[in-house]
Image: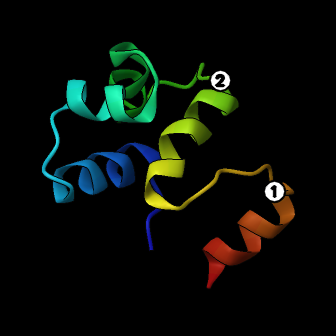
Amino acid sequence: MYKNLAQFTKDKRKEANLTQQEFAERAGVALTVVRKIEQGKENLSLAKVNQVLYMFGSKLIPAPMKEIDERDKR
């Protein structure tokens, strides 16, 4: 299981054998969006992140901290 959005995105993009530019074009976002995600930047638009994750059949949704903390303890 991935704990890091940046690594997940980078690994999935590489599995698809795409450069950041190619991936950005296919996802319909600016190259800077893909770069920011893969660099682990924190000030990202949820809509843009989901636009990128959609390429992998995934989606990022808000979750209560309690649920995240409990899952991390397992």
Kindly identify the amino acid type of the residue bearing the numbered disc 1: Ala
In the rendered image, the vertical position of residue 25 relative to residue 70, given as above or below: above
Q: Quadrant of residue 36?
A: top left
Secondary structure found at label 1 = loop
Residue density around tag 2, few if under 14, some if 14–19, many if 20 or more, within 10 Å: few
Residue where numbered disc 1 is placed: 63
Secondary structure found at label 2 = loop
Q: Quadrant of the C terminus?
A: bottom right
Q: Position of residue 51 (x, y in %)?
A: 56, 37
Judged left or right of residue 22, residue 31 is right
Q: Earlier in the sequence, mark 1 or mark 2?
A: 2
Residue density around tag 1, few if under 14, some if 14–19, many if 20 or more, within 10 Å: few
Judged left or right of residue 43, residue 46 is right
Q: Residue at x 54, y 50 (%)?
A: 54
In the rendered image, the vertical position of residue 61 relative to residue 22, given as above or below: below
Q: Residue at x 56, y 25 (%)?
A: 42
Label 1 – label 2 distance at C-alpha: 16 Å
Q: Position of residue 61 (x, y in %)?
A: 75, 51
**Residue in the foreground of this view, choosing between 12 and 36:** 12
Judged left or right of residue 48, residue 19 is left
Residue where numbered disc 2 is placed: 45
Q: Quadrant of residue 58?
A: bottom right
The answer to whether the residues at label 1 and label 2 have Cβ atoms under 8 Å apart is no
Q: Residue at x 81, y 69 (%)?
A: 67
